[in-house]
Amino acid sequence: MRNNASIATLLFVVIAALGLGLAFSYSSDLSSTASQLIFSISLFVAIIIASATKVASQWTRAVVLRLGKFRRLNGPGIFFIIPVIDNIPYWIDIRVISTSFKAEKTLTKDTVPVDVDAVLFWKVIDPKKASMDVADYYSAISWASQTALRDVIGKTMLSDMLEGRDKMSHILQRIIDERTEPWGINVISVEVKDVLIPEGLEAAMSMQAQAERERQARVILGDSERQIANMFNEAAKSYENNPTAFHLRAMNMLYEGLKTNSTIVIVPSTAVETMGLGGINGTLGLVKGIQKEKEKEKDKTFPNVM
């Protein structure tokens, strides 16, 4: 590691410089046997101390083996080992790690091939188990995640998978955590990113959803028409025993129709007689009167400019 190399180099240089100074103080001639012996001893001590000094980062734990047997965990900070006798085969990162995994062309419970992408968030909680009980916990976690994902897909219907990603994520988290717990690893969460289905099936599902929306729209429209018919029926009952109100309503409808931009209005003769407009001449007079009022409104809105 970079920190170890820096500290070891610094200690080596300092101890070697001290030995060289001590050799000079003992004899100004470095060619003498005593001076060479002092300098050689200082170099040997510098090498031993430099190789024995290790530094672990805040998020790192060092697994120390002594003659092949587990000795201890060290870190964070500076620590010392016995050169040659002790060695550090693993530096374990205890931070949260994210690993992506996928399952391609896996059949669901209803025999639909799907591609599923997911992300696993995990961390090492027992560095000793992670280093001693499994050869490579990174690849072990990856394979355990993929096999768990394939098992869950094979037991899940496509519709449930598309609608319930959160439920599928919780199931995956539970299964993977059970498999990795003996390795000293804790699965924090699993997030299903995407579920890809064949293009033909996707088009068919889109058509099915569109047809369902159209059916719902027709049902809503039919219900609205039924409600309107019931309201018209209630209104007809209120006019049934009140001819005067019915005449006023009919005249108001005729007036509103003539008030618009329409120039031709077809009115049944029976309706004219019922409203008591005096026959067709009375109706024509009403139409002319309304047209004159409209022309006056136009003149007020757009006066002639000389």
Image (tube, rainbow, N blue to C red):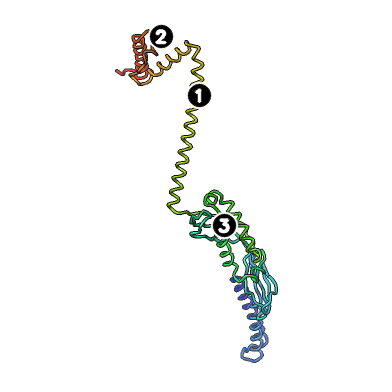
Q: Earlier in the sequence, mark 1 or mark 3?
A: 3
Element at badge 2? loop
Q: Is residue 188 above or below residue 253?
A: below
Between 64 and 9, the one lying in front of the other is 64
Quarter of the C terminus within the rendering: top left
Residue 235 in view of the camera? yes
Residue 152 has which mark? 3
Q: Which quadrant would residue 119 be assigned to in this image?
A: bottom right
Q: Amino acid at mark 2?
A: Gly
What is the secondary structure assignment of the residue under circle 1?
A: helix
> Label 2 to label 3, Cα distance in Å?
79 Å
Residue 132 versus residue 1: which sits nearer the camera?
132
List the residue tagged with mark 1: 230
Q: Which residue is mark 2?
A: 276
Q: Secondary structure at mark 3?
A: helix
Earlier-in-chain disc, 2 versus 3: 3
